[in-house]
Image: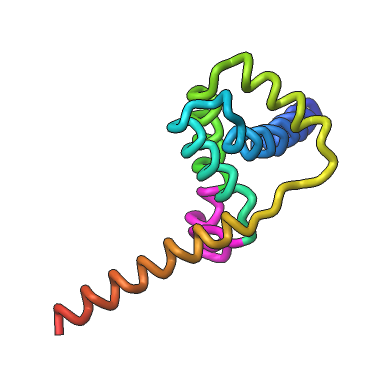
Amino acid sequence: MQLISKAKIWAKSLKRDIVALWLAARDPRVPWHAKAVAGAVAAYALSPVDLIPDFIPVLGYLDDLIIVPLGILLATRLIPAEVMSALRDEAARRIERPSGRAGLIFILAVWLACIIFLALALRNLV
């Protein structure tokens, strides 16, 4: 029972941090490199499309269990602590969830680049 409640708290904090990173990507107090990382992590986490689809055994859930939390950890360490604290407070107060359109575009662009690279590689082999 204790483990389940801890997992729920952790999941809520991840959701809050994703919104906080989305806000950080637009905040003038955040350095540009932290904005880039925060924006990429938030876009990926909010995207309705995964880089590795969930139907692929084991690998499909790696992004949800490893990549997103590690990205959040990296981005939150790049943002000054007092700014991140203020952004977390603002994220906790927000009712609306940010749109995942930027994440969708990012993931589709990565998939398109992979398909083009694969097509060019296969063309050179033939």
Residue at (51, 45) in percent of width and height:
40
Image location of residue 113, percent across then percent down: 36, 66
Relative vertical location of residue 44 with respect to residue 4 in this rendering, above or below: below
Relative vertical location of residue 2 with respect to residue 36 in this rendering, above or below: above
Residue at (51, 31) in percent of width and height:
75
Residue in front for this viewpoint, 92 or 73: 92
Residue 79 in sight from this viewpoint: yes
Q: Quadrant of the N terminus?
A: top right
**Magenta-drawn stretch contains 55:** yes
Residue in front for this viewpoint, 62 or 74: 74
Residue at (15, 85) in percent of width and height:
126
Is 67 positioned to the left or the right of 85 in the image? left
**Magenta-drawn stretch contains 56:** yes
Q: Which range of residues does the magenta coloring cover?
A: 49-63
Image location of residue 66, percent across then percent down: 51, 41
Return the residue found at the far left: 125
Question: How would you classify the magenta stretch by its main secondary structure?
Answer: loop
